[in-house]
Structures are given as structure tokens and as C-alpha cells.
Image (spheres, rainbow, N blue to C red):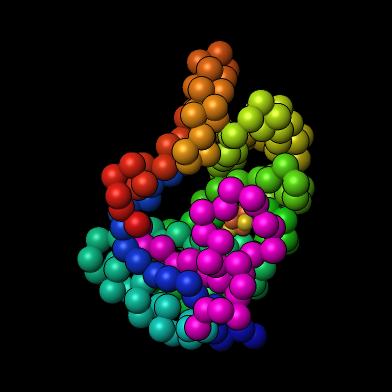
Amino acid sequence: MTDNLPVVETFHSLQGEGSHTGRSAFFIRLGGCSVACPWCDTKHSWPAEAHPRQSLAELAAETKAAAEEGAAFVVITGGEPLHQNLGPLCQALAPLRLPLHLETSGVDSLSGRFAWITLSPKRHRPPTRELLATCQELKVVVHEAADLAFAAAMATQAREARGGGQAPELLLQPGWDSPAGQALAIDYVRSHPRWRLSLQSHKLLGLR
Ligand code: SF4
């Protein structure tokens, strides 16, 4: 059983993206990612061994302190957090009774138990059917027209994977510093009412 994990950083801020934008959240950013998105804004997180390992007890203590300061939920992000077995971390945080959120590209099997899963699938490494079936939110980053076709395909696959059950929230997020992605995403959302625009509001505001 894993009793420690590579941690890039932990911090208490506001969730900047997606359906929970603007809410107080405690972030645990785990190290390690082999997905290699060219536009990744956390490339420093890629080598897991570059980041000190923190015990689950330490992470639980930090999370408890953030909860006492008002964090409404915990976001497990990365890197690609599902490169690690997240079961023990979720167990360690469970007594705090804060909802646990996960942000993942969906290339690995799901581990741990989460109240909210944000699946951010990548064209060059499509996600597993398991994550398409279980995510609460599908958030696709847009740089070019092919990303819109991919987003539509992911929404269809997510619907099929859950046999017609509750569909995930559908969000398009323009790539940071991508005027083309911004124009494409806005235009698409205007004519596709099931989709919503997600902005990286923390970057616009200069927050972490
Ligand atoms: S999956 Fe996330 S952390 Fe990994 S390369 Fe892509 S954007 Fe970066």
C-alpha cells in the first residue's frame, strides 16, 4: 500500500476552471505525467522523481488545515494523478468529509473514490471507456478545429459508455494564449447549447 506520493505542490485557492469555478478549493498537485501534451502548462510536473514524496498523513493534515480555513473541496490534480494508485490517498482524506475532486486525462484505470471527476481527454492519448463512463465533467481544450471534432466524438462516446444515463457536463476550454482556440470555442458553444465555455479564470486573475 502506497503511504506516500510525489507532490509538486499543495495550495488553497479558488477553483479556476470548469463547473466549480470560483469555489474555495485545496489543491494537491501530484508529480508524474507521461501524456506529453505539447501545450502543457505544468511541464515541471512530468518527472515524478523530481518531486519530494509526502506521506498521506502529512497530506491529510494539510487538507484538514485548509478545510478549517474554508476549503469546500479537495482537487487532486497533476501531472497525471491516475499514474498513481489514488485509493490510499482517498482513504486517508475520507475522515475529513470534504468532497474529493479529480482532474485527469483518463489514460489510466480509475483508482480511489471521487465525488467529482473532470475528464480532460487528449487527442493523441484518448481516454479509457471507464473514465468516459464515470466522469461528471468532460472538458476539452481547444486550439484548432480538429479539437472540436474530437470534443463531439468524446461526448458521443461518453453517452454510449453510460448506456444513455446521465450525460456529463460538456465544457470547451480555449488553450491559454490561443486566440484561434478562443474564437473556435465561442463560435461552437453559440451553436451547440449543450456545451459551455470554460476559462482559466485563475490565470486571468493572477491566482495560483
Ligand atoms: S495530461 Fe496534463 S499534465 Fe500531462 S502533459 Fe497533458 S496537460 Fe500536462
Figure check: 191 above or below 77: above
Q: Residue furthest left?
A: 69
- For residue 40: magenta? yes
Residue at image position (67%, 68%) is 83
**Which quadrant does the N terminus fall into?**
bottom right
Query: Does 97 sit left or right of 195 as displayed?
Result: left
> Can you give x and y, in whole percent of width and height, for residue 128 in the image?
76, 51
- Quadrant of the drawing holding the C terminus: bottom left
User: Is residue 88 positioned above or below 37 on the image?
Assistant: below
Magenta span has 77? no
Where is ligand 1, by quadrant? bottom right
**Is 132 on the left-hand or right-hand side of 202?**
right
Of the pair 109 and 208, the residue shown nearer to us: 208
Which region is colored magenta? 25-52
Q: Position of residue 141 (x, y in %)?
A: 58, 39
Q: Is residue 115 above or below residue 7?
A: above
Please indicate, yes or no, whether residue 4 appears anywhere in the rendered image: yes
**Residue depicted at 36% across the width and 72% down the height:** 63
The residue depicted at 69 percent of the width and 63 percent of the height is 34
Instruction: Residue at 66% x, 45% y: name it.
Output: 121
